[in-house]
Image (cartoon, rainbow, N blue to C red):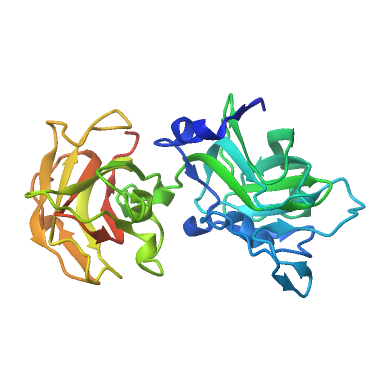
Amino acid sequence: MTAQRIDIDKVQSTFSGICIDLISASLGGSIVSFSDEFFASASNLITPTAPIQRAGHFIASGAWYDGWETRRHNPSTADWVVIKLGVPSGVVHGVEIDTAFFSGNHAPAVSVQGVFLPGGMPDETTEGRWETILDTQETGPNQRHVWRLERPAEKPVSHVRLNMYPDGGIARFRLLGTVVPVWPDDSEAIVDLAHVANGGFAVSCSDQHYSVKDNLLLPGRGENMGDGWETKRSRQPEHVDWVVVKLGAKGYLEEIIVDTLHFRGNFPQAVEVYGLNAETHDVAADDARWELVVPKSKCAKDTEHAFSSTMMQNVDGKVVSHVKMVIIPDGGVKRLRVFGKRVVGA
């Protein structure tokens, strides 16, 4: 797989608006197995926050590091860790290896492999099925290394294996790509079309000063206010904030849920939801085709505001590809759920 190294100042423009981190712990990414984690846990690799340093802090195994670190003098060619994606499967477009704060003990080189095992887990029988995603690449100390795959793999993967040669430390591992949903066999099933695991994607928003729009589509209801979407306080009359979400598949809307869990003094006063059908990934917030789906509704703290089809308008027989949630005038929302019947083949 041919890869091109990307300058750090171009990472955002290269992947933003298209890709997510497929192995992030916030999505449900998890460590399956590893060769060694003597100095620091492999689970740190998929922590969604940036790595930190605690200089001079020591634990039983040695100096504390926010990353994955193996012991010295590995007799094998490489140390490795196997990770299950946080979504059913995905196509990889880029790889990031961050060696922040590892200097003198960083991994000199890495490679990444992937495999698609629907409903299964890697074992000794999987060995011959691993395919190269990123061929062996040199790394350096205390820096982010990012590669864009010039021709993303056509096959989706459900698990990846990170190899580091021969041993050492890595702070974070990001697998940048797009979700390939696994849909129910029943085409009449009601599913959350906006959920990240089903390919939902937060395309754009008016503001994400305190926490990012992508959190709206994560699994579960989260742990605190920090893993929702929160905008700064507005001071202009008639101000509103908004977020545009592309659904993982076109569908007929059945229910929308706006969850304000953990937002108690900063939830929106009210919310509106709009829908439209488009063929493009990105749709402008001021597109003339938006139709009001959920009329202006009052919000409360710590509440799942559920809007059934009988409470919505402009949805009967209409296919929707994107939704726009408007919060009035500003504030925070934990999750946005858009339940509906998928349009098969659309």
Taking 227 as reference, is 138 above or below it? above
Residue at the far front in the pictured view = 56
Query: Image check: 68 left or right of 19?
Result: right
| The N terminus sits in image quarter | top right
Q: Nearer the viewer, residue 139 or 237?
A: 237
Query: Image check: 330 left or right of 167?
Result: left
Residue at the far bottom in the pictured view = 60
- Residue name at image x 43 percent, y 36 percent: 16
- Residue name at image x 62 percent, y 49 percent: 159
Q: Quadrant of residue 259?
A: bottom left
Residue 184 visible in the displayed image: no
Report x, y in % for residue 303. Answer: 22, 70
| The C terminus sits in image quarter | top left
| Mark count | 0
Taking 71 as reference, is 198 above or below it? above
- Residue name at image x 55 percent, y 35 percent: 8
- Residue name at image x 16 percent, y 59 percent: 308
Taking 32 as reference, is 80 above or below it? above
Report x, y in % for residue 336. Answer: 28, 56
Query: Image check: 37 left or right of 277?
Result: right
Report x, y in % for residue 287. Answer: 16, 31
Query: Image check: 242 left or right of 75?
Result: left
Residue 249 visible in the displayed image: yes
Q: Quadrant of residue 297?
A: bottom left
